[in-house]
Amino acid sequence: MAFASKKEKINKESASGPGRQGRYGKLEKREERAGWSFVAIWVVGMLAFTLIPMIQSFYYMWFKIKARNGLQFTFVGTSNFTQIWIEDPDFIQGIVGYVWQTLLQVPIIVVFALIIAIMLNGKIRARGLFRLIFFLPVIIVSGPVMNMLVSEGAASIPALNTQAVVSAFDTFLPYAIAEQLGTLFGNMIMTLWYSGVQILIFLSALQKIDPGLYEAAKIDGGSGWECFWKITLPTIKPMILINAVYTVIFLSSNEQNELINLIKTSMFSATAERGYGYASAMAWIYSILVTVIVLIFFGLLGSKKDVYDRMVKKRRRLAKKEERLAKKIARRSVRNKKKIERQRRSRKYRTYDGSGEG
């Protein structure tokens, strides 16, 4: 048994070969260097423009800061958080509205982006023009342009009676949910403007699906609906999670978000109760809330392990178990052999034919 396990180990080593392992090592190092070169700019920007301000705001939130002849710090501990939750109803209402709007808008944006991406992936004329049309709002409608369009009423449908929508949903839903649905319908155009990047991500994922899978499914009698549920959706499931997380982050950092504007107003407030420390505490509460929402979507849409992957890991565990058992048997055989040798030298052994001394 020991000889067989040693022979199998030698065969594995000869199959891989030192030269082949060296080539794979060089390839992995080259790919690693290429990956770091791509993300180096982001890493530098993250360290310089995100991590340092985060540490600074974490320090500020424990103080009352007054901008008089420079910044004057007064340590207050958790007083900023207590003041936010007890004395600031606008922030609490903003959090509630943000949570409802995010939980409602994210599925609508992702589903709309998926439908448009499937349509744009089909064989239609002027496909590139339609892709440009759907992505154009991402470039144009941003920052001050978006604020101007919203102030002019371009983000809503003029003929839509929002109050009628709220009344219709209020008959079978709580008023808080019905009100958020009415707001969502009122800003439907702006919601659809937010789906340009998601459409491109879905489109890139759809173009990587092997057309042979659809041909094989159609030969077996599969309909388009079955192909979508059995081929398209499982293949692009990781992209659904990416789009959901991207949408949450985009809606959370958008200039149309009331909480962002409230934090900015509190930061530059001239009152003694607010300021940089108060706004930093609000920002950290808001960031924790955004993180929780992202984790919720990750838990709902996170890709479970594939059946094949589970079988491979199970097979690897069994192989390791068999290898440990083989080593154990080999060690036991070596010990028994040494024991028999000692008994043979001392002539204290007995064989099957009765020879030897008992």
Image (cartoon, rainbow, N blue to C red):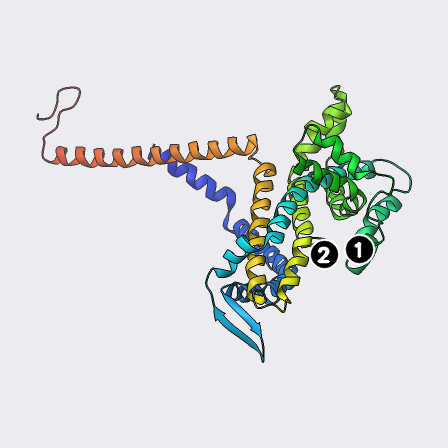
Q: Name the residue type under label 2.
A: Glu
* Tag 1 secondary structure: helix
Residue drawn at (91%, 39%), measured in percent from left and top? 125
* Image location of residue 309, percent across then percent down: 54, 34
Q: Earlier in the sequence, mark 2 or mark 1?
A: 1
Quarter of the image where one finds residue 269:
bottom right
**In front of the other: 17 or 229:** 229
Relative vertical location of residue 332 with respect to residue 225 in this rendering, above or below: below
Instruction: Give the Cα separation between the discs numbered 2 and 1.
Output: 9 Å
Judged left or right of residue 18, residue 122 is right
Q: Tell me residue 346's x, y (percent).
A: 9, 35
Q: In which quarter of the image is residue 351?
A: top left
Q: Is residue 352 visible?
A: yes
Q: Which of the pair 103/203 is nearer the observer?
A: 103
Q: Where residue 5 appears, x then y in whole percent? A: 38, 36
Quadrant location of the C terminus in the rendered image: top left
Q: Which residue is at a point 26% across and 34% down the rendered structure image?
A: 332
> At numbered mark 2, what does the secondary structure look like: helix, strand or loop?
loop
Residue under label 1, please give it: 146
In the image as oriented, which residue stretches furthest toward the right?
A: 125
Numbered label attached to residue 255: 2
Q: Residues within 10 Å of mark 2 (few under 14, many from 20)?
A: some
**Does residue 127 appear left or right of residue 14 in this picture?**
right
